[in-house]
Image (cartoon, rainbow, N blue to C red):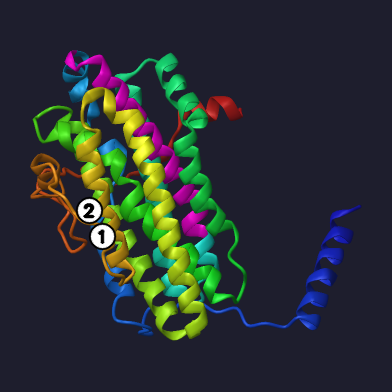
């Protein structure tokens, strides 16, 4: 088929579609105020934006070599688990929710958050590459695929993301619930150890990356929680509210039971499992609060080192926080024509 014939065929196909299913394609209008918070979260995301290459985790290499092997093993596993959850959220969760949210400005915010989830996932690999051999890295990712508790929570949140029905607010609401539980609760069993070490002056450079991730996850959970509240209050029937309330509580209980088992497997060998469990209750209640639900778990004393790690000058659990004094964004000079000359690429092409 010639190019002329191909173009004619394509043009005919598109014209037939326009004729049979006419629709209006809309551009996002940031001057139209849909709510009082979406623009705030857009700006907050921009202010917090970062990339992993702006940090130097290699500063931790000497400390890493002196850590107890059991702590090293736990550290590798929690970062591997966090990588899986961020991968799931960046490639499935945020895109799925964004696809079914109608307001274009909200889609933009959710898409930005999805991008940051992928930056989080990459940042763990940046830490791995500075501390581990290739064989050790492969072993971590093999463990991720084989760990039943990690796969369990990934599968549970995936179920809700993959079962959003177009035009069905109930399924969208439950997907948002799963997203909030992931962002505000499930990540934190993994965050505990890096915060605990950094608070003692160990693995501080890697801890700075974790701190940036926590800041992001905090605003992600709050924003999706606000969208979920709007659906719950305005678009669900009384019967549907009763149904989603039951499923929300059931899902949290299932995830909590699984998190206990996951925590015991990783943290019992270093004697921190009970403290991590207390931390789980604390963050589960935070997740429920993001959905405007009552706290369901009795909170116990949180390790002060870890709690302080959530609210230091360099990072905070509060989504209105600044980027942090210890964060040093890379400085860039003005670009010139020479910056766009790539000798190696030219050699490959010519």
Q: Which residue is mark 1?
A: 286
Q: Is residue 184 above or below residue 79?
A: below
Q: Mark 2: which secondary structure? A: helix
Is 308 inside the magenta-drawn segment? no
> Residue 50 at what x, y percent from top left?
28, 48
> Residue 225 at what x, y percent from top left?
35, 68
Give the extent of the magenta segment: 66-95
Circles 2 and 1 in contact, beta carbons < 8 Å: yes
Is 72 inside the magenta-drawn segment? yes
Residue 177 visible, this angle: yes
Relative horizontal placement of residue 218, taking residue 327 as reference (left or right): right
Please tell me which residue is depicted at 18% across the width and 32% down the height of the picture. Answer: 205
For disc 1, the neighbor class at 10 Å (few under 14, some 14 to 19, many from 20) is: many
**Which mark is on residue 139?**
none
> Residue 90 at what x, y percent from top left?
45, 50
Q: Nearer the viewer, residue 37 or 274?
A: 274
Relative horizontal placement of residue 297, taking residue 321 as reference (left or right): right
């Amino acid at each position: 088929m010639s190019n002329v014939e191909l173009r004619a065929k394509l043009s005919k196909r598109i014209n037939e579609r326009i004729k049979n299913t006419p629709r209006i394609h809309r551009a996002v209008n940031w001057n139209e105020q849909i709510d009082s918070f979406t623009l705030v979260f857009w700006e907050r995301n921009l202010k917090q934006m970062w990339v992993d290459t702006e940090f130097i985790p290699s500063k931790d290499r000497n400390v890493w070599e002196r850590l107890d092997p059991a702590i090293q093993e736990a550290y590798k596993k929690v970062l591997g688990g966090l990588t899986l959850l961020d991968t799931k959220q960046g490639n499935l969760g945020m895109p799925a929710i964004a696809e079914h949210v109608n307001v274009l400005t909200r889609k933009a915010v959710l898409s930005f958050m999805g991008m940051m989830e992928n930056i989080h996932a990459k940042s763990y690999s940046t830490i791995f590459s500075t501390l581990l051999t290739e064989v050790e890295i492969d072993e971590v990712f093999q463990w991720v695929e084989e760990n039943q508790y990690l796969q369990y929570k990934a599968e549970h949140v995936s179920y809700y993301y993959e079962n959003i029905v177009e035009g069905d607010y109930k399924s969208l609401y439950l997907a948002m619930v799963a997203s909030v539980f992931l962002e505000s609760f499930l990540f934190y069993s993994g965050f505990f150890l890096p915060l605990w070490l950094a608070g003692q002056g160990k693995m501080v450079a890697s801890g700075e990356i974790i701190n940036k991730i926590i800041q992001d996850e905090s605003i992600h959970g709050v924003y999706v929680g606000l969208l979920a509240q709007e659906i719950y209050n305005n678009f669900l029937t009384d019967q549907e509210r009763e149904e989603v309330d039951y499923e929300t509580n059931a899902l949290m209980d299932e995830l909590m039971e699984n998190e206990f088992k996951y925590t015991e497997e990783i943290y019992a060998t270093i004697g921190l499992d009970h403290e991590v469990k207390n931390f789980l209750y604390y963050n589960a209640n935070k997740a429920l609060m993001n959905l405007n639900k009552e706290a369901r778990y009795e909170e116990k004393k949180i390790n002060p080192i870890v709690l302080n790690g959530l609210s230091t000058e360099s990072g905070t659990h509060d989504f209105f926080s600044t980027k942090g004094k210890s964060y040093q964004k890379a400085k860039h000079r003005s670009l010139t024509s020479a910056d766009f000359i790539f000798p190696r690429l030219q050699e490959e092409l010519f």
